[in-house]
Image (tube, rainbow, N blue to C red):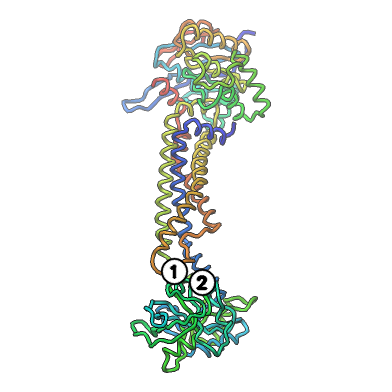
Amino acid sequence: MTPAEQPRLVEAVGLTRTFPMGAGPVHALRAVSMQIAAGDYLAIRGPSGCGKSTLLHILGCVDTPTGGTLIFDGQSVGALPDAERSAIRLRGIGFVFQRFFLLPMLTAAENIEVPQAEAGAGRRERRERTAELLEYVGLSHRATHRPSQLSGGEAQRVAIARALANRPRLLLADEPTGELDRATGDQIAALLDRVQHDGTAVVVVTHDAAIAARAARTLNMADGRLVGGDV
Amino acid sequence: MNAFAFAARSLIRQPGRSALGILGIAAVGALLFDMLLLSRGLVVSFRDLLDRDGFDIRVTATDAGPIGGPRLPHASPIAAEVAALPEVADAVPILMSDAEASHPGGPPVAISLLGIDARSGRHPWTISSGHDLEDVAAGTSGELLVNQALAASLTAALGDEIAIRVRCGPGRAPLPPSTFRVVGVAEFPFDDAVQLSGVVRRARMAGACDADGRDEADMILVSSRQGGGPDAAVSAIRRRRPDVHAATNEQIVARLAVSRFTYFRQISTVLSTITLLFGFLLITVLLTVSVNQRLGEIAAVRALGFSRARVAADVLWQSALLVGIGGLLALPVGVVLSIWLDAILKTMPGIPIALHFFVFEPRSLLLHAVLLAVTAVLAAAYPIALVTTLPIATTLRNEVVS
């Protein structure tokens, strides 16, 4: 079954996001409509300030659209209260950040355990899932290392493992290779390929054409609008 | 990993800052603890002193009290009437005066002299050597108990004869000397560190002063009968003798707490408030700086699904840990500090050796814990507001831009 034939995981219709600024409102998103199917692999490209990250944040329920509707897994999430949006993020969506944002006082394994604990997983379940994920990203030997003892590539792999900890249906990655060299970035891209191949929908915001080329679909943005690609 | 463990790790991550916070709270908490001990210390200690002599009621001429107020005339019949009440176990009149004491022919020293009707075994002193007044036949009079300081000052031993010249009132010249024999050395609970005290029979002392036969006493010490309690005895005394003033130890302490000891409570309240304000500011500043340095991390864990309540709990636990550990450290520091301060305050003239300004009570510990807990919560309020209202998307974007 191709992604197009999969059931819709995310449906965005006419999303707008306007930031009130002193010099006048900034329209970061203008009537963006798109769909993401389960198991999809989507890259979002565009110049700086075109609204890529804003779109990613709205898709990930960390920001609310000024207008339009957003449906995640059959549920309208645009106007949900913060607690319910947090629950959706915790169990349904994984985030990978450009700057990793691992918690520096925790080991790699503990960083991966944190979202599971927050979701209520038991100790044994957490340990098993963490070991599984560390092996998945090839860092079993780094389980007890703190973020400061990891290379950039290793830290991003731990961040991906953390994002997958609660088996989300959607993984959102914002410039995941932005702070890595080419070779390490390719390793991270290959890992994201594998995540998508194993059934999780992946959306990557990137400047990197090579990374974008690995996705099944690419959306191009400019000035807050989708201007081309496979919407 | 629960919020407590998360907060503990966050504090361990910044050991220097955490140590400063804990030490700051330990210092502030020690001062707070001492102020709580001081706020009621004098009252509790004074109550203990009053209770220690075995009398739970004081009868005086007026509510002005035995010092500074008028004396009770005809004290013996009043004491007899009071002692005859079924609610009363004992009633002992006492007379207090200044005097001069000396070995015959030796230099005189100023002393505080107590005259007492020594009919029962209940007395406001403790014999440390020799005999009590009761141990001497009543007719022989002329017995004298001295405190250790007076015995040392006069180099008086048991059996020595001491010449005493009683001053029958303030500003009055001392009377011609009467000779007393030292029969015992005693400890008096209200003596200060340098006070020279003695006690004789009231009849002998009053006889020297009282040419008119007024049979005066400054106060009648009364002990209530077991089972009835001091309140019932006071009521009975007031019914029997409405012309005198009777008060329980508790009523006396309550009156002093409002009139004379209120300064300590006011000082304690002011200093406690200031110390709590310092503690509040210290923790608020530390947590706010910490939160501001971790905005990216906090936004990230919010993006990962941490609720507002969860990130608020992290901050609250950090505050509780800083204040809790500091508060625990404050207790031994506060105890040591209170002993030192107590010793300094007790060097003031006229303070009884057995009186303490800083007295431990379980309620002080409880109040200490409650005040610090409230401080921890209030100090966390602003940083909690920061983390719970943090705009996740904007913060993540700013972190990348920066």
Residue B287, horizontal then vertical, whole percent: 44, 37
Subunit of mark 2? B
In the rendered image, which quarter contains the C terminus of chain B? Answer: top left
Mark 2 is surrounded, within 10 Å at the Cα level, by few (under 14), some (14 to 19) or many (20 or more) other residues, namely some
Please tell me which residue lies in front, B146 or A152.
B146
Q: Is residue B95 above or below residue A166?
A: below
Report the residue at 54% width, 86% height from top: B79
The residue that mark 2 highlights is B187
First reached walking from the N terminus: tag 2 or tag 1? 2
**Secondary structure under badge 2?**
strand
Question: How many marks are shown on the rendered structure?
Answer: 2
Q: Which mark is residue B192?
A: 1
Q: Which mark is residue B254?
A: none
Please identify the residue farthest to the bottom as the structure is shown. Answer: B212
Residue type at mark 1: give it: Asp
Please identify the residue farthest to the front as the structure is shown. Answer: B105
> Dividing the picture into quarters, in which one does residue B350 lie?
bottom left
Please identify the residue farthest to the left as the structure is shown. Answer: A23
Q: Are marks 2 and 1 in contact (CB under 8 Å)?
A: no
Residue type at mark 2: give it: Glu
In the rendered image, which quarter contains the N terminus of chain B? Answer: top right
Residue B250, horizontal then vertical, whole percent: 52, 71
Report the residue at 44% width, 59% height from top: B342
Residue B17 visible in the picture:
yes
